[in-house]
Image: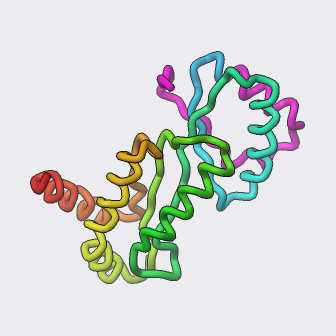
């Protein structure tokens, strides 16, 4: 699907509004007709259940109008320090199944770990970057995702990610 807009609809706060499902379906329709065809979703938010209900209704009412998804995905989570490619894959598969799509427009990925221990978090990221990189390339090769975007939490993590990315690019 070709993206026509630089805007992405963020669904995370939908449940804060007392609007009917029909209202949201109409809004999805109007956004789609305006070129806003990518929705940012996260199963970590209360709004995800509402979003899924609206999406199913929208898909039934307008099956010819396809919506693409940018999904929020953390691996590792706060309680872990290592990247688990099998858990990462299972989270991707869960989104694909729940959203009823064969491909994600993108993943907004975050390495959480222990945010109170930045040095350890950075070291663990360095140790796991090649596994993560392989997994992302595998998902792209298997046509399961188009894009992979990083949410860093901190400037130091961002700087490390940029540096490691350049090193990986030089190996290709």
Instruction: Name, please, the residue furthest toward the left.
Output: 170
Q: Is residue 80 left or right of residue 47?
A: left
Instruction: Name, please, the residue furthest toward the front.
Output: 142
- For the residue pair 6 and 80, the one nearer the viewer reads as 80
Give how far across and how far down residue 136 sits, in percent: 36, 55
Magenta span contains residue 13 = yes
Q: Is residue 103 left or right of residue 129?
A: right
Tally of numbered tags: 0
Magenta span contains residue 161 = no
Q: Which residues are magenta?
A: 1-30
Instruction: Please say which color scheme the image uses.
Output: rainbow
- For the residue pair 86 and 107, the one nearer the viewer reads as 86
Residue at position x 47%, y 50% in the image:
107
Residue 106 position (above or below residue 7): below
- For the residue pair 54 and 142, the one nearer the viewer reads as 142
Residue at position x 62%, y 31% in the image:
67
Residue at position x 51%, y 26% in the image:
1
Give how far across and how far down residue 90 sits, in percent: 55, 64
Give how far across and how far down residue 26 sits, in percent: 80, 25
Residue at position x 40%, y 43% in the image:
147
Q: Is residue 101 left or right of residue 6?
A: right
Give how far across and how far down residue 143 sits, in percent: 43, 42
Residue 99 position (above or below residue 37): below
Residue 67 position (above or below residue 88): above
């Amino acid at each position: 699907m070709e993206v026509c807009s630089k805007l992405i609809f963020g669904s995370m706060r939908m449940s804060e509004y007392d609007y009917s499902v029909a209202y949201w379906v109409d809004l999805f329709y109007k956004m789609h007709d305006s070129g806003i065809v990518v929705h940012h979703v996260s199963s970590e938010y209360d709004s995800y259940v509402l979003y899924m209900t609206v999406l199913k209704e929208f898909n039934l009412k307008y099956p010819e109008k396809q919506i693409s998804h940018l999904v929020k995905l953390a691996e590792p989570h706060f309680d872990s320090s290592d990247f688990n490619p099998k858990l990462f894959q299972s989270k991707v598969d869960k989104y694909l199944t729940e959203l009823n799509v064969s491909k994600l427009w993108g993943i907004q990925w975050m390495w959480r770990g222990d945010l109170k221990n930045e040095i350890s978090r950075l070291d663990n990221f360095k140790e796991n970057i090649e596994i993560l990189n392989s997994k992302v390339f595998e998902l792209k090769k298997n046509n399961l995702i188009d894009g992979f975007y990083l949410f860093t939490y901190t400037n130091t993590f961002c700087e490390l990610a940029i540096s490691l990315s350049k090193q990986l690019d030089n190996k290709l």
